[in-house]
Image: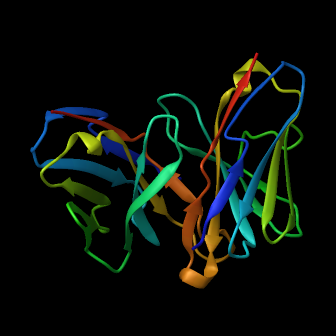
Amino acid sequence: GAVVSQHPSRVICKSGTSVKIECRSLDFQATTMFWYRQFPKQSLMLMATSNEGSKATYEQGVEKDKFLINHASLTLSTLTVTSAHPEDSSFYICSARVQCTGNTISFGEGSWLTVV
Amino acid sequence: KQEVTQIPAALSVPEGENLVLNCSFTDSAIYNLQWFRQDPGKGLTSLLLIQSSQREQTSGRLNASLDKSSGRSTLYIAASQPGDSATYLCAVSKDRGSTLGRLYFGRGTQLTVWP
């Protein structure tokens, strides 16, 4: 139980285009989801906290107009990287808080973004 | 701000050795601490979760301890195997309330176990 599915697992896009990454909770409702980014050899850094039905809360230094987060339902949060640049190439991973299991955290499989 | 440090950054050992991975955090007011495994190009697999009121957790050959007051945790791997090769991440959850579930990660320890 408490499975989080993330899609796509890998994506290559051209510089200047936008890419959408989806994070779905398959068998539970997630009012809160978290988006992280991990550069090579670095730790996972929280980008934003996504709350269903309200605006996301972004961490300091993360451009909210560049990284658009939408959490329109209790099972889906999306991260859209707008006008992607090569420096946005990274590993993006989402997680969801599972309230029915005592607030444990389930992670998606992650998405590798390469901007060329 | 919560900062998480993991030592060593990398570890290479022969099969069968018992290992200790270290994690320290700057703010002892944590809700829980979690150890994850990350295989190359993959997501995260949760290994052990220790609540702030607990001192240790065990799962198979893995044992994690927590000393909240000193801001330290160790992950002990007994009788290591080549299949244990991965990056091990330590993460703490500091917040309660609406941001519960937000994790602060260390950079990880890259473990290689050779036959």
Q: Would you place residue A111 above or below residue A104 in this image?
A: above
Residue A26 placement: quadrant: bottom right
Q: Give the residue at x 80% y 62%.
A: A76
Q: Is residue B110 left or right of residue A95?
A: left
Considering only vertical position in the picture, is A103 above or below A44?
below
Question: Within the image, what quadrant is residue A66 found in?
Answer: top right
Q: Is residue B27 left or right of residue A27?
A: left
Task: Name above or below for residue B47 compared with residue B54.
Answer: above
Q: Residue at x 78, y 68 (%)?
A: A75
Q: Position of residue A99 (x, y in %)?
A: 62, 80
Quadrant of the image containing the C terminus of chain B: top left
**Colour logic:** rainbow
Residue A102: x %, y % from top left: 54, 82
Q: Nearer the viewer, residue B87 or B3?
A: B87
- Front one among A87 and B68: A87
Q: Is B86 on the left or on the right of A41, as rendered?
A: left
Can you see residue B81? yes
Give the vertical position of B82 relative to A95 (above or below).
Answer: above
**Residue B54, how many percent across, how many down?**
31, 78
Please identify the quarter of the rendering in which residue A55 is found: bottom right
Q: Residue furthest top?
A: A116
Q: Judge whether residue B2 can be spotted in this image.
A: no
